[in-house]
Image (cartoon, rainbow, N blue to C red):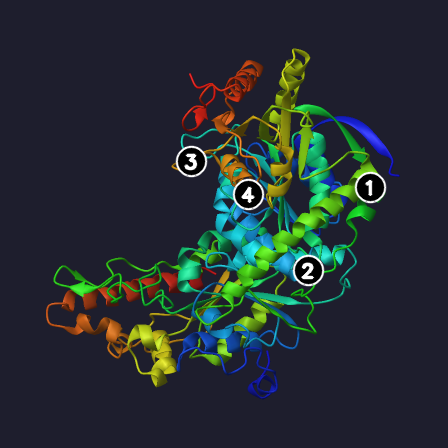
Amino acid sequence: MANLKELTHREDRLEGGHRLCAGCGASIAVRQVLLGAGLEPVVVGCATGCLEVSTTIYPYSAWKTPFIHNAFENAAATVSGVEAAFKGLKAAGKIPADKRVKFVAFGGDGGTYDIGLQSLSGAMERGHDMVYVCYDNGAYMNTGIQRSSATPKGAWATTAQVGAAQQGKQQRRKDLTAIMAAHNIPYVAQASISHWKDLTNKAEKAFAVQGPAFINVFAPCPRGWRIPYNKTVEIAKSAVQTGFWPLFEVEDGVWRQTVRVVNRKPIEEFLKPQGRFKHLFAPGNEALLAEMQSDVDHQWDALQSRFNCS
Amino acid sequence: MPTQKTVAATGNTVVAEAMRQCAPDVVAAYPITPQTTIVEEFAAFVAKGRVHTEYVTVESEHSAMSACVGASAAGARVMTATSSQGLALMWEELHIAAGMRLPIVMANANRALSAPINIHCDHSDIMGARDTGWVMLFAETAQEAYDNTIMAVRVAENDDVLLPVMSTLDGFITTHSIDRVELMDDESVSAFVGEYVPKYPLLDLENPVTHGSFAGLDGPFFEFKKAQREAIERSRKVINDVGAEFSKLSGRPFGMIETWGMEDAEVAIIVLGSTAGNVRHVARGLRDAGMKAGVVKVRCFRPFPFAEIAEALLGVKAVAVMDRAESFGAEGGPLFLEVRSALYDSSERMPVIDYIYGLGGSDVKLELIESVYKDLTDIASGVEAPAGLVYLGTR
């Protein structure tokens, strides 16, 4: 694994000057993941979303590496086609047989948990030599903070509003990382932009395996979460410390915790600074808060037993 | 001259054979009746090592075309095949493939669209794709399906075009019937299609490019669309040139339309696909009985051969368009709308009657076609034409 000094010498493949918001977690996730690709060439694919629209405004491009955007739900299928072309052109003798190229697809949680799940599942099952990275900010941020299946229960979103009849999103979030682990692919990991070393290590591993790899990266959205733009990393860290977003990897079916949390903090520490959870702290919503804590506890315990079984 | 081998084979078999001979670097496909045997037979070529193709067995048609887009942008020669609901599921990606100017070639086994579900032939699937920006070729026979698939590669990859091309054949009637087909030898097909040299491949790592940019309100979206229109207009000449070159090799004539008996026809039927054979057969019989019957078969629907059709119809007194697809609420089916539009600028405008026929594979009996010619003869001699379109042969 590369150390910090080595990483600082690597070229950024996502150049500054793009139009993502100040404090955007997605661009941090992308830069850290691409550092993990090392010095080998990388072809990037991207689902429709903030990352894509803000980095490829014609005739400009913030990408210093080959980049393709196709549509919303098909980043995995598109990159699987690029990877297939690489193999087909090698078989045709048009690309040298020993040439090495990395392929990575980025999608937000909307493009990954929801509309792109089938395309992702198919690409992973087919065994393409590619990495899929979900930058999870827990809602459809590009279209204006609509709820996704990654939105936490109780969170406000523009399609899961807060009012007399309803306190934000009514359903629990989907455990996508576990779903991807169930594909029995060589490498699956859950990471956060707040733990850069853990994330770049995971990216290195993901790029190194032969076959498909998936990383789910926690990437706060200041606009959607109603937090100041300079609190992105802090909030991401708090998600890890409260056990809301545990950091682990599943390597060839073996589940392993990669960042230990010794004294897990109460979930309120993660929720309180975020405007999207403000209503949970209003009088009368104590039960909702208690339920969120118990959900995190339950998820934590289930995960520990997976680590212990492995 | 190429060595040609005469075989008895289905349309799907010879489309798979044409695909093998064109040697795509990537095929990404999903099975659907009645396209299935194309992808099965191609999979057998892959398994036997007879092609170098990377064959991507995707989980849906949407992903099939998505992977084709990725592979084509990467710089590969890319082919696929689909039908009906599969083509409908690809709809979003059909626009993207054309908008990104990717020369993908796809066979389509023309089949009805649900509901009700029906697996048999009509053109409602393919006509739903008529404004997606693809060049669209229609085959009457397995031979034409084979020839069109090979020509499609040359048209798509031509620098003046760079658009995806559909090579369509009628579900079951052409896909599954055994027909007499002349196949060219591998070397001749390979030399004819040549090597694909992509312009801005993603896999040119030294010159990184961004594909699929955002061209919003201030972007050149409008100009990109105009460029697409110019490309499909340029494809007319390319289709004719490629067709002429292929004709020389194969000995089989090709034009955007094919006419029969039109030199002195007084009544004519315009038709797409497999029904053309039956129409010709009926017209031949009627000619023997003294009727001046003609046939116009449309082999290329996009770009539409307006000028060729208007010219072919000069001197005709009444015309029937046979549409195997609906355009609900429009004045007629898709082919009718194009033909009537082609006649607007013509020096002669004769009555044109639209016959909707054969939806969901319903039989088009010879007597029905004969009845159309008889209607036309009546109309030509002054009987009033029916108001609106005619459903031909409903029970």
Is residue B174 in sight in this rendering?
no
Q: What numbered label is drawn on residue B75?
A: 2
Q: Position of residue B393 (x, y in %)?
A: 47, 18
Q: Is residue B109 left or right of residue A52?
A: right
User: From mark 3 to mark 2, how far is it between C-alphas?
Assistant: 43 Å
Q: Are marks 2 and 1 on the same chain?
A: yes
- Residue bearing mark 4: B345
Asked if B192 appears above or below A93 in the picture, the reply is above
- The residue nearer to you, when weighing B173 against A261, is B173
Eye-nearest disc, 4 or 1: 4
Quadrant for the N terminus of chain A, please. bottom right
> Which is nearer the N-term, disc 3 or disc 1?
1
Q: Position of residue A179 (x, y in %)?
A: 44, 56
- Residue bearing mark 3: B331
Quick one: SS at disc 1?
helix
> Which is nearer the N-term, disc 3 or disc 2?
2
Circle 2 chain: B
- The residue that appears at 68% across and 26% down in the rendered structure is B260
| Amino acid at circle 1 | Asp
